[in-house]
Amino acid sequence: MRKTVNKHSKIKSSNSEKETNSGIRLNKYIADSGFCSRRQADEIIKSGRVKVNNVIETNLARRVQPGDNVQIDSNPIKQSVKLEYILLNKPKDTITTVRDEKHRKTIMDVVKTKFRLFPVGRLDRNTTGVLILTNDGELANRLMHPKYQVERVYLAGLDKPLKFTDAERISKGVTTEDFKSSPCEIFIDPADHSLVYITLKEGKNREVKKIFETFGYKVKKLDRKSFAGITTAGLARGEFRRLTKQEVIHLKKAVKLI
Ligand code: URA
């Protein structure tokens, strides 16, 4: 059975390093892998035996990010932290970032966890719905990469009914000010033509709004209904839960990790 974690729950972490969006110290990464102590890691780094993303790193202050490739003597080192996968039903007025300089409410104020999790992609401040957070950098990078064509289904509330001719043009792919969208599926709610489901597969910044703006429509409300088939069914806005093992396997399969 799925366990729902409410807003006030905390997830315990064995990892004592503070949450940060600037990664963790290279020596800690190496120590967490079980290779040696942090102090020994410093010596190994200074001796030039450590590479980050195939470049020798001797800077002891270097921080590594999820997805970075760390090697010692050309052998890959994996930081052994528990991998965590969270599904959030993102509420409005919440910024998709780990830390906000202006102290606005972020998703980390909603998902209270001691894990250093990162959002898989971005939703605008007032966009609601499915947002996955994880510390599995490899999975996150692939889910965000357009190559894997991960489906995102949005329900957009427009400022006026969408004309069928415009829907047809959007479905064939649009050239906006910033990008060219690929062909996509569009479904207009028969009871209210200003409510439109759009399925996109690339994850470009503010893509739904830009697509509709190109045809003179304003997106007044935006809700992500699903991401890679994962929905917020059973989760109220602002609630979150761990993904099930089956859901994690499903995501990994979707991006050819297994
Ligand atoms: N497209 C947008 O315009 N905004 C979002 O938050 C997500 C997709």
Image: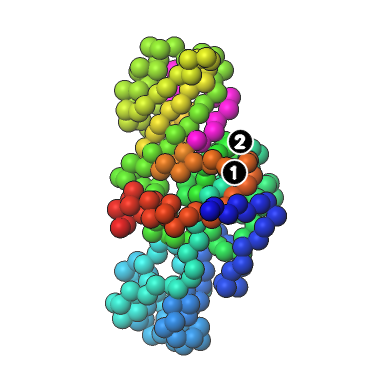
Q: Which residues are magenta?
A: 211-225
Q: Residues within 10 Å of mark 1 (few under 14, many from 20)?
A: some
Q: Is residue 214 magenta?
A: yes
Report the amino acid beneath label 2: Asn
Seen in the picture, residue 187 relative to 149 is either above or below; the reply is above
Q: Residue at x 70, y 55 (%)?
A: 8
Residue marked by disc 2: 126
Q: In this view of the protein, can residue 42 be seen by the observer?
A: no
| Residue that label 1 marks | 235
Using the image, determine if residue 192 lies above or below residue 11: above
**Residue at the (35%, 79%) spot, across then down:** 72
Q: Mark 1: which secondary structure? A: loop
Give the amino acid type for the residue marked by disc 1 in the picture: Leu
Mark 2 closeness class: few <14, some 14–19, many ≥20 residues within 10 Å: some
Q: Nearer the viewer, residue 180 or 177?
A: 180
Left-right relation of 57 to 101? left
Disc 2 element? loop
Q: Kindly indicate whether the residue at mark 2 contacts the one at mark 1 (C-beta within 8 angstroms).
A: no
